Image (spheres, rainbow, N blue to C red):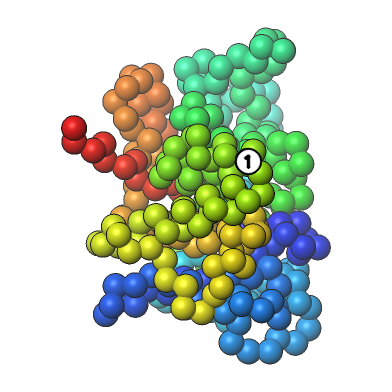
Amino acid sequence: MNLGGGRGKSTAVARLELDEAGGELRVAEARLRHGHRGSGEDREAGGDSLFRDEALVAYLERWVDDETAVAINAPLTLPPCIRCTLPCPGVGRCEVPVVAWMRRHADGLVRPGRSDPGKPSVTPYTQRAVDLLFMRAGLKPRESLGQGMGPLSARAVYLRRVLSPRLRLHENLIEVHPPATVIRLFGEAVEHRLRRADTATIWELRKQILAELPCGQDPARGLGFRYVWPEVVVRSPHVFDAILCAHMVFLWAADSLRGPAELHDGRDAGVDAAIDALELLWLEDGWIWIPRAPTPSAT
């Protein structure tokens, strides 16, 4: 799910189905609203055509079952200071484990800003541990409660609560970030072109990405588009991101991904130590799931 604001204009959903007999991963539907031609819709929808809260909850309640997992590209947990109910001694003296971790590892994870070198390295009231690790890894995270993120984060946390216990974090509900997925699978240059190139180039690049997404044991087989028009996907950034969200939750399940351990690369001992020191704190603090790093080709 590409989650937008509460008005629903930029919220898009995508649903993938795996044909276990034939091995095809296909796009069953992908849309910004009900009634969108070529989006795979199989019935007339009453009520609101946009995915505002009630329509979105009804959609998820219709499709979520014991075999379904959901990915949302918005923070599903709040930063530690916002979650905390203890008397606050200030960030510098806080003993909450994840805040202490952020303070201890900040210098190794966060590069000082050039324009304001005096800016605090960490602000646990706007950031989570995953934000710091992703910044260091070059995965372009958004601060969980950074500029412009407050309403989106609040909506995501609301949806998580209203859909509980049907959706359970890290069990059948995960947080994802499409730019990080693209960087991990195709490289930073491709992700940059998706944002900066002209419209025709962006559409063509999206087509190439959809054709090359890993979809099982056969690396030559891309997503199947039996029910959805590919043009519907590539012409909308919101629908395209919804597809990336759905594909990421497929990889999460198929590859048995391990959370922070997937960031280990052996090239930076300080970063590896920070990942190890995080231990299981990420289960409560939150995590953004990314694909396993591609294995380097033999030369």
Residue at horizontal 66%, vertical 73%? 57
Residue furthest out toward the front: 200
On-image quarter of the C terminus? top left
Q: Nearer the viewer, residue 83 or 270?
A: 270
Residue furthest out toward the left: 299
Q: Nearer the viewer, residue 202 or 125?
A: 202
List x then y, in percent, for residue 281.
45, 39
Q: Amino acid at mark 1?
A: Ala
Q: Residues within 10 Å of mark 1 (few under 14, many from 20)?
A: few
Q: Residue under circle 1?
A: 197
Q: Specify whether 136 is left or right of 33.
A: left
Q: Nearer the viewer, residue 21 or 231?
A: 231
Residue at horizontal 71%, vertical 73%? 33
Above or below for 9 versus 23: above
List x then y, in percent, for residue 265.
32, 30
Residue at horizontal 66%, vertical 59%? 236
